[in-house]
Image (cartoon, rainbow, N blue to C red):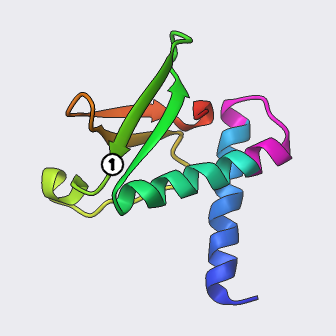
């Protein structure tokens, strides 16, 4: 196994562990959600993505978000930590920054 694949596996394992701590789910469900989160991050880093998540109030929010203007806005590089249970994104519909709990991505 290549070193980059080992690093990717470690990141995936860390995200799965975080997801299982935050919400009761099977390992298979956590792995699936971790892959969806990573895909969402990649789409937002290179453009925009439509996605939905459940708010703490149990309401479902459908939105379009991006991360392309992060460095310009915050004047620092974006550091993505797989152990972080919240994700920052720029809401293109409301034109402001928001966070959501990654365990509740739909």
Asked whether 74 or 68 is in front, the reply is 68
Q: Callout 1: few (<14), some (14-19), or many (20+) C-alpha neighbours within 10 Å?
A: many
Q: Quadrant of residue 3 in the image?
A: bottom right
The residue at the point 78 percent across, 29 percent down is 24
Location of residue 13 with respect to 88 vertically, above or below: below
In magenta segment, residue 2: no
Question: In this rendering, would 11 be left or right of 45?
Answer: right
Asked whether 72 or 95 is in front, the reply is 95
| SS class, disc 1 | strand
State the residue lying farthest toward the bottom: 2
Q: Which residue is mark 1?
A: 66
Question: In this rendering, would 21 be left or right of 90?
Answer: right
The residue at the point 60 percent across, 30 percent down is 104
Q: Quadrant of the C terminus?
A: top right
Q: Quadrant of residue 100 in the image?
A: top left
Location of residue 103 with respect to 13 vertically, above or below: above
The residue at the point 51 percent across, 9 percent down is 57
Residue 82 visible in the snapshot: no
State the residue lying farthest toward the top: 57
Q: Position of residue 9 (x, y in %)?
A: 70, 69
Residue 59 visible in the snapshot: yes
Q: Position of residue 35 (x, y in %)?
A: 65, 55
The residue stretch that appears in magenta: 21-31
Majority secondary structure in the magenta region: helix
In magenta segment, residue 28: yes
């Amino acid at each position: 196994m290549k070193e980059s694949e080992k690093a990717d596996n470690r990141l995936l394992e860390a995200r799965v562990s975080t997801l299982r701590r935050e919400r009761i789910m099977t390992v298979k469900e956590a792995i699936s959600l971790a892959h969806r989160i990573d895909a969402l991050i990649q789409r937002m880093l290179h453009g925009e993505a439509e996605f939905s998540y459940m708010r703490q109030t149990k309401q479902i929010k459908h939105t379009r978000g991006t991360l392309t203007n992060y460095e310009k806005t915050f004047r620092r590089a974006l550091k993505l930590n797989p152990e972080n249970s919240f994700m920052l994104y720029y809401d293109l519909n409301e034109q402001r920054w928001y966070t959501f709990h990654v365990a509740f991505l739909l």
